[in-house]
Amino acid sequence: MVADPGVFRDLAYVFVAAVVGGGLARLARQPLILGYVFAGILVGPLTPGPAVSDVHNFEVMAEIGVALLMFSIGIELSLKDLRAVRRLALVGAPLGLAAFIGLTTAVGLALGWSMVAGVSLGMVLCVQSTMVAARLLMDRGETGSRHGRLTLAILLVEDLAVVVLIVLLPTLGAPGTEGLLSIAKALGTAALILVPFFILARRVVPRLLLGAARMRSDELFLFVALAVGLATAALTQAVGLSQALGAFLAGLVISGSDYAHDTLARLLPLRDIFAALFFVTMGMLLDPALVFANLGLLGVLVALVVVGNLVVWTVVVRLFGESLWNAVLTAAALTQIGEFSFVLVQVARRAGHVGGDVYNATLAASLLTILINALLVQKVRAWIGRMRLARSAPAAEPIPPSLQGHVVLCGYGRVGSAIGEALETFGIRYVAIENDPDIVKGLRARGVPSLFGDTARRGLLDAAGVTRAALVVLALPDMERTRLAVRELRRVSPALPILARAHHATARALLIDAGATEVIQPELEAAATLLRHSLERLAVPRPQILAYLERLRAAADTALILEPLGGTDLPFARDVTLGEGPVVGRSLRDLRLRERFGVVVLTVTRETGEFVSHPAAETVLRRGDRVRVFGLREQIEECAAAASSRS
């Protein structure tokens, strides 16, 4: 079989353009999305110069990118995260959609459009691109933040709403209840298929992943995970829902399993490649000639999407008790339209509700709002934070160039504040970086040098004097933000000691690869502390406890699984069953086993089944007792031989 050389040429164009566009965006410190979209414009068939011959090939890849991105977000989140914002999702999201459609209808009537045209356009523009919003949140490490969860909850409801809008659009202006019956039928069919499927999937999928893990094949494990995600996306698409919703739900199924973190780590490279192809494909669809031919209409659509969504969603989120800070950040993430609007405007056009000019202007508005949205999301946090600080906080004192050997503390939440208080107790100077203006205000009021903003920003790191610092401590709650910060810190100072935290081994490995000097796992430290206290209560000698804990941490550092300690030079526990011998009938005090052999008696189990934990010195050993002793292999063997025991 001879492959079409045009396909490989098109792939080369796309990948080279993506590298150039993404690289320029990174150098300009702009979101990568901007670079990818501009790359697509350059190699698109509607612009002069080298161009791809078949955009359809890349549209298929773009759809895979959407599914993989939503699949990975579902793995990262949990049902617990979404339950926390269910009130806004179930009530607030439909309210926001209705409010935006009403606003668009009012603007359309003011411009002389018909009622049907205004409502149709509102339906087309009310649904945001899940792919764009999710990718921006992920790039900024904010998927787990409060406004990140609010945004994702609204987007999931919008994915469901697309089904309703597709059915409802052709029926606008028609009498009767045909539209409502069609909607009820579509949603009922979807529920009948999906609800049993996901109940079954919660039981079956973890077992599939377990089976793949036992085969010890990285490729097979990845294929099983991809099969789960893409098959679920195909199922939801088959019943009339979006594939993005299905992929997200598949990720949620995996998120509750023991293999969630490993699955996510294997998926990341593939996800990032296909996600980039999505944005390059978006750029290919732009026709610059149509943009200039419909500038007036295009301006109206862009203003409705950006300003309208910003106002509507800020008000709606505030109505549900969220802070103005979270409301504005959530609304800013929703100031764009994307792939769903393409589908809806085609439906509206076929129904005769909008003309070809609106169709073309919607495509152009989608790309322009994506570009505006990427810039707005990047800037709005800094704008609002600076305004709040300027209004209520003392002015920031510049970090003096003479400050050297200090600690840069990134993140001042529960963990960061505890570290900061300890540094103050020991008289160690530090500079705090925090993106919550209220926390920065409190720090400045206490006289603590503090900077507002994103830790991964080069200018902020320079202002904190990281090149003169003795240490950087990353106490950020989000793994992705931490990884971005580590990478930027390594670019600024290759030799700077960087301490970070991670909640699982996979995340720890990613941070080490990014350049972190040391990564602390809170769960491992908690287990070590619990183990130390347990062994101390069992009278295990402290040096032996510390030796064991040292090896436990070393095993974590090298990603090794602890082998049974009996084959090492470290102490371990072993059962010794007493037969006839000199130890029978004597007390532990008389035997002086610790002084003579260096072993500790942990438990004694009698032949009658009586169990003695942490036996007292007066405990008398009997024939048939099973004694658990703790010590080095040589010590235990010497003790057993002296007691003439059988083990």
Image (spheres, rainbow, N blue to C red):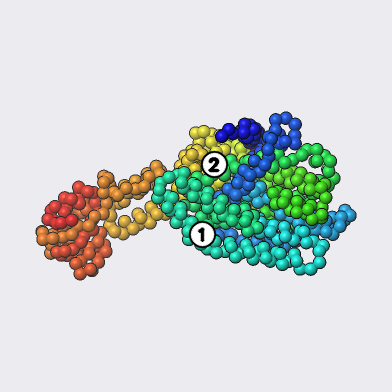
Q: Quadrant of residue 321?
A: bottom right
Q: Please state the horizontal and vertical placement of residue 612, each as a whole percent of the image.
A: 24, 65
Question: Could you tell whether 136 is left or right of 49 in the image?
Answer: left
Q: Quadrant of residue 593?
A: bottom left
Residue 422 shows in the view: no
Q: Quadrant of residue 626?
A: bottom left
Question: Could you tell whether 185 is left or right of 586 in the image?
Answer: right
- SS type, badge 2: helix
Question: Could you tell whether 378 is left or right of 593 in the image?
Answer: right
- SS type, badge 1: helix
Residue at (43, 45) in percent of width and height: 217
Residue 182 shows in the view: yes
Residue type highlighted by circle 2: Pro
Q: Residue furthest front?
A: 1
Q: Which numbered disc covers residue 343?
A: none
Depth check, front residue: 322 or 206 = 206
Residue at (51, 39) in percent of width and height: 514
What residue does disc 2 label? 269
Q: Please state the horizontal and vertical placement of residue 600, each as a whole percent of the image.
A: 23, 55
Q: Please give the count of numbered marks on the rendered protein.
A: 2
Q: Please state the horizontal and vertical placement of residue 271, each as a whole percent of the image.
A: 57, 44
Depth check, front residue: 440 or 585 = 585
What residue does disc 1 label? 201
Identify whether 140 is placed above or below 120.
above
Residue type highlighted by circle 1: Ala
Depth check, front residue: 383 or 590 = 383
Badge 1 density bin: few <14, some 14–19, many ≥20, Cα 10 Å: some
Q: Nearer the N terminus, badge 1 or badge 2?
A: 1
Q: Please state the horizontal and vertical placement of residue 542, each as a whole percent of the image.
A: 30, 51
